[in-house]
Amino acid sequence: MYDIKYHTTDISQNSFLITGGAGFIGSNIVEYLLRYGAGKVRILDNFSTGSHANIEDFKNNPAFELLEGDIREMETCRRALAGIDYVSHQAALGSVPRSINDPITSNEVNVNGFLNMLVAARDYGVKRFIYAASSSTYGDHPDLPKVEDKIGNPLSPYAVTKYVNELYASVFSKTYDFHAIGLRYFNVFGPKQNPKGPYAAVIPLFIEAALKDYTPYINGDGETSRDFTFVENAVQANIKALLLDKVDKDEIVNIAFGKRTTLNELWRSIASTSMTAVIPEYREERKGDVRHSLADISKAKKLIGYSPMFSVTDGLDLTVKWYNNQAKM
């Protein structure tokens, strides 16, 4: 989709596994790898939140492989990792409200499934293991911007699961000499993000409301702020982290743009781009939500060479156009 190359090495002889590869972020990573000639790109997805539509364009590519299965099953993880050099682990059950409503399933997928993947990747000796961490790990720590080594108490079961991932990665590094990099995503948005269902993220919900001229809901007073991050920036982070020359211990880095946007500002921007005059409706704040979030991305810049190329405004323009085109198809 974007003709920007984030790596300099030849990947034509390398094999990649993207778990959750039919999901939002995963399918964008797959698209990049196939565009630049990866030798093999295998995805593992159970399609509980992923979509066949997200990977439809890849199915005729000879380098693409689809394994339908669940990371909660160890044998499935082992099959997925056979012959793989690099892993980008994106499979997870996201959403704070989902985890509050069903903490057991969130734990089974995000903790048990993650541990299965770590064990299988260790046993197969993969060259690099990158995984989707989360800014929710910062919990109630008040400082802004968020710095990797200063976290608070988690505010939701989802946040607990993502913190446990980091703890397991650290233990595996110390115990098995198996080094992973966790990418703490800050509110990633963009094409292929699902606007449907009870746990849809705010930006696709806002965009769908704007394009269809119906009233969107804003939780709280709208002054809650987030470091919204266009998905292509997350793709860049994954590619750079995957292809690092050397990592000698487990690492955690923030992946964001480095700028706060309030929900009110977000709606105004989307409404302007979509040319709608719809007025949002305000309701109670959600349980488990953090009031403000902003990332310090200096460690990611230094460690993996991360340099976000798409601002929130750029990303929103591109995302609105994508959803608009999808609606016309």
Image (cartoon, helix red, strand yellow):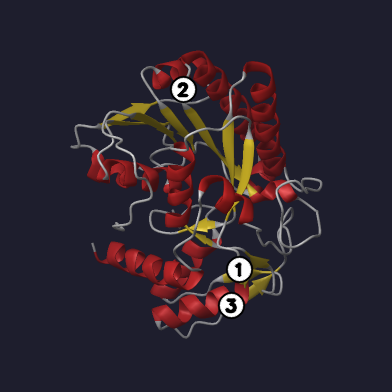
Q: Quadrant of residue 276?
A: bottom left
Q: Which residue is mark 1?
A: 259
Q: Nearer the viewer, residue 61 or 198?
A: 61
Secondary structure category for the residue under label 1: loop
Residue 45 percent location from the top left of the image: 41, 32
Q: Give the position of the N terminus as an image quadrant.
A: bottom left
Q: Which residue is mark 3?
A: 265
Q: Which residue is mark 2?
A: 126
Precedes in sequence: disc 1 or disc 3: 1
Identify which amino acid the numbered label 3 is placed on: Glu
Secondary structure category for the residue under label 2: loop
- Tell me if residue 154 comes above or below residue 289 in the rendering: above
Precedes in sequence: disc 1 or disc 2: 2
Secondary structure category for the residue under label 3: helix
Q: Nearer the viewer, residue 210 or 167?
A: 167
Q: Quadrant of residue 165?
A: top right
Identify which amino acid the numbered label 1 is placed on: Lys
Residue 210 percent location from the top left of the image: 44, 74
Structural distance between the alpha carbons of marks 3 and 2:
43 Å
Is there any visible trace of residue 56 in the rendered image?
A: no
Question: Is there CB contact under 8 Å for labels 1 and 2?
Answer: no
Which dot, 1 or 3, sits closer to the camera?
1
Structural distance between the alpha carbons of marks 1 and 3:
12 Å
- Tell me if residue 317 comes above or below residue 291 in the rendering: below
Left of 77 or right of it: where is 149? right
- Tell me if residue 219 comes above or below residue 146 in the rendering: below
